[in-house]
Image: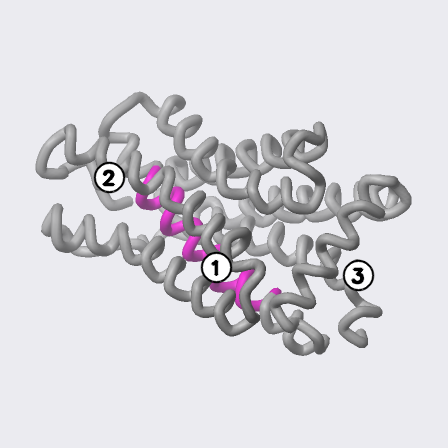
Amino acid sequence: MQDLSKNPTRSGSWAAVVFALVLPTFVTLAYFVWAESFSAGVQQSTYAIAKVVQFGFPVFWVCWICRQRLRLWPTSSEGIGVGIVFGLVVAVAMFALYHGWLKSSDLYANAEGVIRQKITGMELDRPWKFIALGVFYSLFHSLLEEYYWRWFVFGQLRGLVRFWPAVAISSFGFMAHHVIVVGAYFGMASLETWLISFSIALGGAFWSWLYHRSGSLVGPWLSHLLVDSAIFVIGYDIVRDLIGG
């Protein structure tokens, strides 16, 4: 596990952490909310630029400010089994909630229209496009989020506060930008939005703990991958008739 606590100054470390905590919220607002009324091309360009800035910041900070080399992949495979089990349990719980309750609820009826509108605006009008997006998020974006939230944000915080406060701060930061996405579908004031968002924070806390325990991002990444895959399987079921699936 790379030691990210050896930064130029303590105040500089806090500045990097605060910036990293709030940046994803502005990134999500940029591509998910502010660019929504523009064409699909503008939305996709906004997304690409915003994500490059977000995921590029840790590289900039570690390599140019702290003068360290990036070391993301220790040889240990510890934590993979635990991560996979956690991901599978969460995925099964999501499928059970979706098919057993959400799909027949009024909440689903309200969210379905918003989800379909978002899919149409992004021009995900073919099954292969939706599946390609799901594969990208599940395989690659989940890894980038683990590198960003566990390796960098949590890694920085461990040098500034004790273990559990580091877990809590990084996990609520991880939750914050998801609130915008979930709130767009279910309403910012709905209880379900905040329950789902808090569940995301708990997932982030587990992945921080697993990363700390194992010293590797592989277990958290595979766990995250399974959860994201479940989300896109559910999403495909919601928009299947819209995209010709």
Instruction: Specify the label residue 22 is tagged with.
Output: none
- Residue 178 makes an appearance in the image: yes
Q: Nearer the viewer, residue 140 or 214?
A: 140
Please state which amino acid type lies under the numbered disc 2: Ala
The residue indicated by pointer 2 is 16
The residue indicated by pointer 3 is 237
State the CA–CA distance, disc 1 to disc 3. Answer: 21 Å
Of tags 1 and 2, the one toward the viewer is 2
Q: Is residue 113 left or right of residue 12?
A: right
Q: Main secondary structure of the magenta part?
A: helix
The image position of residue 13, as x and y in percent, is: 19, 35
The picture quadrant where one finds residue 38 is bottom right
The residue indicated by pointer 1 is 141
**Disc 1 crowd, CA 10 A, few/some/many (<14, 14-19, 20+):** some
The part of the chain drawn in magenta is 134-153
Q: Say which residue appears at 48% left-offset and 47% top-offset.
A: 220
Please state which amino acid type lies under the numbered disc 1: His
Name, please, the residue furthest toward the front.
37
State the CA–CA distance, disc 3 to disc 2. Answer: 40 Å
**Disc 2 crowd, CA 10 A, few/some/many (<14, 14-19, 20+):** some
16 within the magenta span: no
First in residue order: circle 3 vs circle 2: 2
Q: Is residue 104 left or right of residue 183?
A: right
Q: Quadrant of the C terminus?
A: bottom right
First in residue order: circle 1 vs circle 2: 2
